[in-house]
Amino acid sequence: MTAVFFDMDGTLIDSRADLAATVNHTRRDFGLAELPQLEILHHVGQGAGHLLVHAIPELAGKGTGRPADEVREAFFSHYGEHMLESVTLYPGVKDTLEALKERGFLLGVNTAKPRFATLAILENFGLTSLFGDAIVAGGDCAEMKPSALPLRQCAALMGHGLSPDDWMVGDNWTDVKCAANAHVQGVFCSYGFGVLADSVPSASIASFPELAELLYSAQLSAVSQTRTDTSPGTSGFSSP
């Protein structure tokens, strides 16, 4: 079976307003001026620690590369209260995921988003059952994307061994390089708010429903190739 792993922010969900509002709420708590949404979103995709260090650099832990505990606590408190206020699914996400599940694809989530937020948002949109236990969120793994480790951990949760026919889908360079590091196919979601940087995806999609066509086509090609490889006269041996 083929497995497909998904990022959350900028891939399944449009969380721009909530993330930016939470950062700016936290900045106001500490007497700091708000930042433009685009400047905040530039730092999304590598975990809450990375976001806070770069979006609230004035309060980052000295020399540690980690946000001060009180800043982190304030951020998570605000986000927990408001994370469902403006977040939406991108068009076609639920229908496409359900269609892929029906078609026999294994589905998993590989995100840097904190687990409490990941689970709450998936539940809010009725997506939890599509992924089951195959969810690796920020803090669940010793390493984060672009490391292949969280992808391997997610595959293990679904009882699946990664293969080159599997896919990692996301809107950021971390997702594409995670795919490359795990030796699976990487799909870049150009409709999201991440950046591709110097990463090279296997394919790009401008809307989520395009993913189904891409995966179905790849599935059919794989079946066709298998039939060709196993058909009479393809063994490579000459007739006597």
Image (cartoon, rainbow, N blue to C red):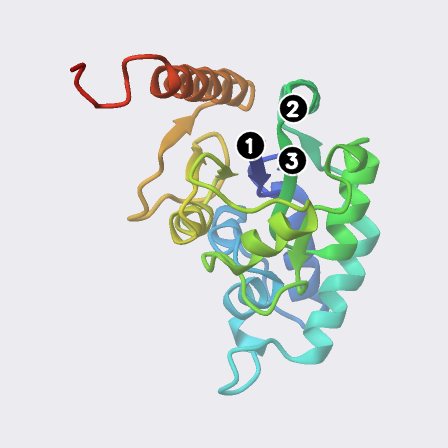
* Residue placed under numbered mark 2 in the picture: 104
Residue 168 x, y percent position in the rendering: 50, 40
Query: How many residues crowd around disc 1 within 10 Å: few (fewer than 14), some, or many (20 or more)?
Result: some
Q: Residue at x 28, y 48 (%)?
A: 198
- Circles 2 and 1, Cβ within 8 Å, touching? The answer is yes
Q: Residues within 10 Å of mark 2 (few under 14, many from 20)?
A: few
Residue displayed at 64% across by 18% down = 103
Cα distance between the residues tagged 3 and 1:
9 Å
Determine whether 194 is above or below 46 in the image. above
Residue linked to disc 3: 107
Three-letter amino acid code of the residue under disc 2: Gly
- Answer above or below: position of 68 versus 155: below
State the residue lying farthest toward the bottom: 63
Mark-to-mark CA distance, 3 and 2: 9 Å
Q: The residue under label 3 is which amino acid type? A: Leu
Among the 4 quarters of the image, the one containing residue 28: bottom right
Task: Check the picture and name the quadrant holding the N terminus.
Answer: top right
Mark 3 neighbour class, 10 Å CA radius: few under 14, some 14 to 19, many 20 or more: many
The residues bearing labels 2 and 1 have C-alpha atoms spaced at a distance of: 8 Å
**Considering the numbered disc 3 on the image, is that residue within a helix, a strand or a loop?**
strand
Q: What residue is disc 1 on?
A: 2
For this view, does 236 lie left or right of residue 138? left
Which amino acid is tagged 1?
A: Thr
